[in-house]
Image (tube, rainbow, N blue to C red):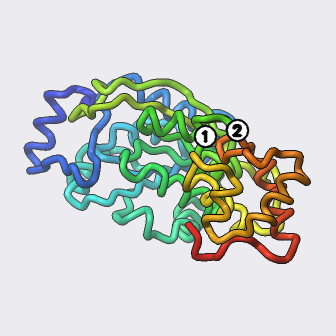
Amino acid sequence: MSNLTDTRYVKDLLSRHGFTFSKALGQNFLINPTVCPRMAQACAEGLPGAFAVLEIGPGIGVLTRELARVAEKVVSIELDRRLLPVLDETLEGCGNVEIVQGDVMKLDLPALLREKCQGLPVAVCANLPYYITSPILMGLLESRLPVENITVLVQKEAAQRLCAASGTRECGAVTLAVEYYAQAEILFQVSRGSFLPAPKVDSTVMQLHVRHEPPCPVQNEEFLFRLIRAGFNQRRKTLVNSLAGAGGSKEAVQNALARLGLPATARAEEVALPVFAALADDLYGAGDPPLDPASP
């Protein structure tokens, strides 16, 4: 079988197919021989012997082949049509792999999993383009797909932000959103030299263990996330001023913070997810939510 971690072979493979890298699609193919087996093994941990994997962006198939070794079924979504003939060659003999051409942000993923995975437990695994990491992850989580874990290779700084503890300076709105849906952990680091072409930054493999129930249920999830986004939209300001600037009632927010034992000077980065949830319920339960639906 062809060696997809050999730079010379990969360049020849792509040249034969007339393929050139697209900066717009953030294409950086893994060539480090140790990374993909570790990702596939992490994906399989805790799952029964027979499970399915949804892969996003197989590229030339180096991770796909490792996933095919551990999973009963692999469904790989590839946006770039130019890679389809490449994958036909590199995945020859992988009878449990099916390539679906399309945009993961536009496909009906629940229907796709029902059709392709035949009731098997499902994991997600991907080497994600840096420019669209957060939208893809949030799309997967918000759609509440029936998946057990999500193992992804992302830019190092993105992993640090996504896995940060709530209530810390590294935390952002997306951190709390991820925490609401999953438990995030960093698995291992990947150097920039592990890719062809090499990006200008290092990467990290992280894993999200999808929660079956949120850690802090709220009366209205949409309102909670509007509140969080508004709070972090101007993170240098106090939470009172940030929410007031997004159309909220300054007095209502001050009173709610006081009831929760928080100072009026609290900033969003200092507030943990359970406290944000309590604040959202307090304000929403008062019958006069402070944020307009059009707020950021």
Q: Please give left or right for residue 57 compared with residue 196 in the image.
A: right
Estimate the x, y position of residue 21 in percent, counting from the top left: 18, 47
Foreground residue among 200 and 272: 272
Disc 1 on helix, strand or loop?
A: loop
In the rendered image, which residue does mark 2 sit on? 167
Query: Where does residue 121 sit, x and y in percent of width and height?
Result: 65, 51
Residue 4 falls in which quadrant of the image? top left
Three-letter code for the amino acid on which mark 2 is drawn = Gly
Q: Position of residue 32 (x, y in %)?
A: 33, 25
Q: Amino acid at mark 1?
A: Cys
Residue sitting nearer the eye, 184 or 5: 184
Q: Is residue 115 above or below residue 195?
A: below
Tag 1 near tag 2, CB within 8 Å: yes
Q: Dot 2, how many residues are within 10 Å of its Cα: few (below 14), some (14-19), or many (20+)?
A: some
Q: Is residue 29 visible?
A: yes
Residue 117, image quadrant: bottom right
156 to 81, vertically: above or below? above
Give me the residue at 61% from left, 45% from top: 175
Give the percent coordinates (x, y) of residue 163: 60, 36
**What is the count of numbered marks?**
2
Q: Which residue is mark 1?
A: 171
Give the residue drawn at x 18%, y 35%. Answer: 10
